[in-house]
Image (cartoon, grey):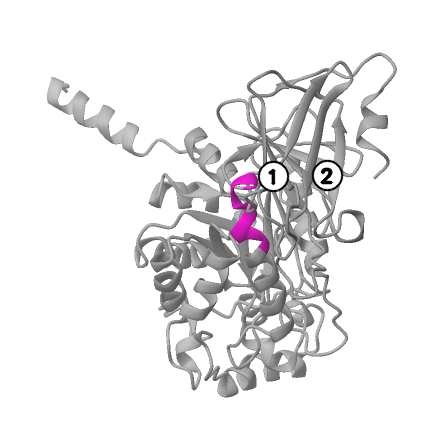
């Protein structure tokens, strides 16, 4: 058989086209590291009973599984769902991307799927929630991320596989061809019917599926399944490359109507600061109610974050870690380019409104061009104080950079804004700590 040049070219082109992508693109990883903050949204059919999302099915009786899968869809009707309200709130709070639970472990699909009847279109709601969420968040310039569970409790239940997580071979798509085909059919819908998807979060065994996702959309960034994504904890030290910490505001991911104390706004802001100082992104979760509203406690916390973000966004977006994450209780980030460092200084009772504070930052080396400003504050006037000097003073010294600044931005009527003040320090270099100081001493005990 004679092999023609044209045939060889066709063969080479086809093999190149179908070469399997095995990792995120480096430029997409850098893009992700700029994001800083994302909104995680856990919402599914079992929100109606305030259950832990999906997991109540694991190990449940046949009667429970039958009622869960047959009865809950009949009453799911979130009449107050407004994706535009969600997206505007996320934008104000500084979220650069969203990750929505398209299909959690229960297997209930929150989009118009042809793969199963266990989906949102077969409820009284009869609307494609995913389509509306994507449109609303895109309108706000927020990148789109999809959460997808490779494990599927509804599939297990219908195929007489014990319902659980990664406990028998049939739970793994790579070892269950029928489950793999089912998941791929759903991924194909998600990655072809909704335009460009920026991020996908595989909560479960992703082998074979992440490669398929990259085949469908080579620029999609896989987070869980391709990078470190700790839940409810932060690493002790900075982590090289992209990573993402996932946190709830209360004690659960989906709406928990009772027994769910929420974190304070200050705790959440401090968590964002620490995450960014260590080079990661924070994926902060909201759990909308059964009627589609974001619960008032979480909305309030996001609005507190929005106010802080209004003044300080540049210190957490498109930044990278500094040489040292902190000195004592003062955390650092740095701008991607130039010699600008951001110092996050605790306020509240530690630095009250209208007070001047003096700092010595031992690992910052200034010069005649070093400039310090307070993000969100002009450092000229303090409201109602006549002839008050609110200027920032900075002095390079052999022991470090000495800064004197006033906390003068008035956020609350009672002047008791409890959240960190951010100093923008331009034209500064790293000053290695001397022989008498150790990194542990500078960073303090965590």
Residue 277 location, quadrant: top right
Question: Could you tell me residue 383's position as x and y percent?
Answer: 61, 55
Residue 68 location, quadrant: bottom right
407, 4: nearer the viewer: 407
Q: Are marks 2 and 1 in contact (CB under 8 Å)?
A: yes
Residue 270 falls left or right of residue 193: right
Say which residue appears at 39% left-offset and 33% top-offset: 20
Using a 10 Å C-alpha cutoff, classify the residue at mark 1 as few (fewer than 14 neighbours), some (14 to 19) or many (20 or more): many
What secondary structure characterizes most of the magenta part? Answer: helix
Q: Which residue is mark 2?
A: 235
Magenta run includes residue 309: yes
Question: Could you tell me residue 305's position as x and y percent?
Answer: 60, 57
320, 260: nearer the viewer: 320
Secondary structure under tag 1 reads loop
Question: Could you tell me residue 156's position as x and y percent?
Answer: 58, 66
Residue 280, label in figure: 1
Residue 310, label in figure: none
159, 31: nearer the viewer: 31
Q: Is residue 106 visible?
A: yes
Say which residue appears at 49% left-offset and 37% top-offset: 318
Work out whether 283 lies above or below 3. Answer: below
Q: CA distance from mark 2 to mark 1?
A: 10 Å
Work out whether 176 lies above or below 281. Answer: below
Looking at the rendering, the stretch of residues picked out in magenta corresponds to 308-316
């Amino acid at each position: 058989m004679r092999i023609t040049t044209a045939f060889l070219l066709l063969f080479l082109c086809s093999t190149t086209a179908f070469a399997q992508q095995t990792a995120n693109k480096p430029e997409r990883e850098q893009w992700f590291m700029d994001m800083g903050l994302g909104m995680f949204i856990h919402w599914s059919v079992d929100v109606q009973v305030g259950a832990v999302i999906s997991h109540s099915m694991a190990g449940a009786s046949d009667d429970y599984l039958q009622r869960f899968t047959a009865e809950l869809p009949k009453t799911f009707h979130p009449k107050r769902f407004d994706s535009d309200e969600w997206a505007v709130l996320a934008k104000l709070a500084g979220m650069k991307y969203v990750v929505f639970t398209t299909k959690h472990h229960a297997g209930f699909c929150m989009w118009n799927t042809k793969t199963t009847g266990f989906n949102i279109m077969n409820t009284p709601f009869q609307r494609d929630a995913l389509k509306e969420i994507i449109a609303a968040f895109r309108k706000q310039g927020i990148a789109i991320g999809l959460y997808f569970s490779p494990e599927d409790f509804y599939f297990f239940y219908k195929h007489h596989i014990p319902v659980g997580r990664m406990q028998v071979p049939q739970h793994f798509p790579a070892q269950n061809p029928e489950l793999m085909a089912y998941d791929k059919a759903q991924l194909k819908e998600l990655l072809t019917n909704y335009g460009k998807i920026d991020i996908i979060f595989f909560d479960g065994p992703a082998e074979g599926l992440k490669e398929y996702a990259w085949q469908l959309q080579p620029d999609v960034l896989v987070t869980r399944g391709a990078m470190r994504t700790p839940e409810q904890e932060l690493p002790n030290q900075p982590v090289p490359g992209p990573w993402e910490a996932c946190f709830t505001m209360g004690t659960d991911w989906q709406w928990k109507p009772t027994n769910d104390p929420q974190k304070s706004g200050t705790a959440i802001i401090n968590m964002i600061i620490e995450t960014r100082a260590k080079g990661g992104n924070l994926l902060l979760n909201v759990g909308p109610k059964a009627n589609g509203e974001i619960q008032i406690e979480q909305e309030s916390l996001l609005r507190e974050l929005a106010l802080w973000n209004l003044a300080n966004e540049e210190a957490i977006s498109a930044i990278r870690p500094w040489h040292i994450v902190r000195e004592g209780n003062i955390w650092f980030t740095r701008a991607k380019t130039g010699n600008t460092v951001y110092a996050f200084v605790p306020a509240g009772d530690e630095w009250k409104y209208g007070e001047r504070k003096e700092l010595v930052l031992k690992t910052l080396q200034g010069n005649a061009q070093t400039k310090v400003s307070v993000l969100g504050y002009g450092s000229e006037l303090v409201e109602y104080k006549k002839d008050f000097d609110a200027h920032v003073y900075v002095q390079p010294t052999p022991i470090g950079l000495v800064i004197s600044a006033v906390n003068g931005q008035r956020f609350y009527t009672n002047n008791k804004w409890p959240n960190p003040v951010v100093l923008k320090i331009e034209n500064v270099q790293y000053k290695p700590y001397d022989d008498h100081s150790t990194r542990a001493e500078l960073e303090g005990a965590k």
